[in-house]
Amino acid sequence: MDGWRARLGFLLPPGNPNVEPELIAMAPKGVSVHFGRMIARGVPGAHDGQDARTRCQLDHIDEPTEMLAHLRPQVIAMAHTASSYMLGREGEIALTARLEKQYDIRFTSAFVSVVAAMEELGVKKIALGTPYAEAQTLAGKATLESYGLKVVNYHRLENVRNIYEETPARAYALAKAANTPEAEVVFLSGVGMPTVEVLDALEKDLGKPVISSVAAMMWNCLRIAGVQPVIPGYGRLLAGE
């Protein structure tokens, strides 16, 4: 049966077409990945209305969590970095504690996984690249810094019509634009922008770790599930270097 090593559950925004193929591609043998859609109204992936969609997802997070919990995965992860930015550090800690108690399943998020990945890599100085509007980008910067990390530079992807229509090539260019010599790591925020296939190339070209929300989330979920997170081809975090 699938998932004989572990079952991983992920809560996704309703319109995200990119994160499922990335997570499926990264899943090691014997690890199954399962998905639930969060509830939001409006145009998926657009800058306009993003805060309202995020609030709706958080207001209704119990419905998809309850449904996904029926599969009894080892962990459920909220695959939406901007939700963590809206919650803030203390809000996310409280939400995690409530959901874990209510459903008796470990709960994490893409963003909490990023923070854990920074600790694993031993880095604190971050170059941040996002496909968001300025307000969401600054919220991300503030949330990172609330965990004791330092954002030494940030860069927003220009001319974004819809985050879900972005490409790996644009993600690659975003990381290079965000990078500075002072940064110890480049972080590509957002699970809606496809990133994982360019992480290895970016690390070779920039000479430093490059992580994305999706890669960090997979790494952390595997750790929580008790599976050694060694998956070559997606950067040094998942390669176990």
Image (spheres, grey):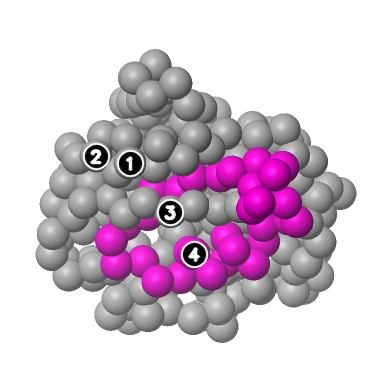
Q: Earlier in the sequence, mark 2 or mark 4?
A: 4
- x, y (%) of residue 234? 72, 63
Separation of residues labelled 1 and 3 (CA atoms): 10 Å
Separation of residues labelled 2 and 4 (CA atoms): 20 Å
Kind of element beneath mark 2: helix
As for residue 92 lying within the magenta part, the answer is no
Residue 63 marker: 2
- x, y (%) of residue 126? 59, 48
Separation of residues labelled 1 and 2 (CA atoms): 6 Å
As for residue 17 lying within the magenta part, the answer is yes
Q: Which stretch is magenta?
A: 1-30
Q: Which of the two marks, 4 or 1, is nearer to us in this view? A: 1
Q: Earlier in the sequence, mark 1 or mark 3?
A: 3
Q: Amino acid at mark 4?
A: Glu
Q: Is residue 222 visible?
A: yes
Of residues 188 and 227, the one drawn nearer to the viewer in this rendering: 227
Residue 67 marker: 1
- x, y (%) of residue 83? 32, 44
**Tag 3 residue:** 35
Q: Are marks 4 and 3 in contact (CB under 8 Å)?
A: yes
Q: Amino acid at mark 2?
A: Glu
Residue 20 marker: 4
